[in-house]
Amino acid sequence: MDTSTREDHWRRTKSLMIVTLTIWFIFSFVVHWFASSLNSVTFFGWPLGFYMAAQGSEIVFVITLFWFVKAQDKIDRDCGVAEED
């Protein structure tokens, strides 16, 4: 792999990591810091702050995990470093 491809791969991977960690931070900390404010809104009959603390954040984490794997695989394939099945 040449230097420009390696740099492009790392740039795209780093951007993906930053987006993923930002999503993780928001749903791990920010949502829970404002849980009492979110409780004024209901979601399926539950206060939103309680729902996000109990289940919502975990759902977002699982979705983010699958999205991350698919996006990283696309980056790897585009840059020619993908592992073959």
Image (spheres, rainbow, N blue to C red):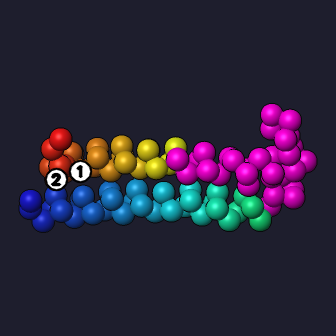
Query: Is residue 60 positioned above or below 45 on the image?
Result: below
Instruction: Decide: few, some or many residues near mark 2? Use Cα within 10 Å; few <14, some 14-19, many ≥20.
Output: some
For the point 87% across and 58% down, the residue is 36
Q: Amino acid at mark 2?
A: Val
The outermost residue toward the right is 40
Q: Nearer the viewer, residue 1 or 60?
A: 60
Q: Going by the image, does 6 lie left or right of 33?
A: left
Residue 72 in percent (x, y) is at 32, 50
Residue 47, above or below 45: below
Give me the residue at 86% from left, 35% from top.
Answer: 45
Q: Which residue is mark 2?
A: 81
Q: Nearer the viewer, residue 43 or 21?
A: 43
Q: Position of residue 9 (x, y in %)?
A: 24, 58
Q: Check disc 1 and report its element: helix, strand or loop.
A: helix
Tell me the quarter of the picture where residue 7 sits: bottom left
User: SS of the residue at dot 2?
Assistant: loop
Depth check, front residue: 16 or 27: 27
What is the span of residues highlighted in magenta in the rendered image?
Answer: 34-62
* Gap in angstroms between the C-alphas marked 2 and 1: 5 Å
For residue 54, the mark is none
Residue type for callout 1: Asp
Q: Does the stretch in magenta take in 54? A: yes
User: Residue 60 colored magenta?
Assistant: yes
Q: Which residue is mark 1?
A: 76
Mark 1 neighbour density, 10 Å: few (under 14) some (14–19) many (20 or more): some
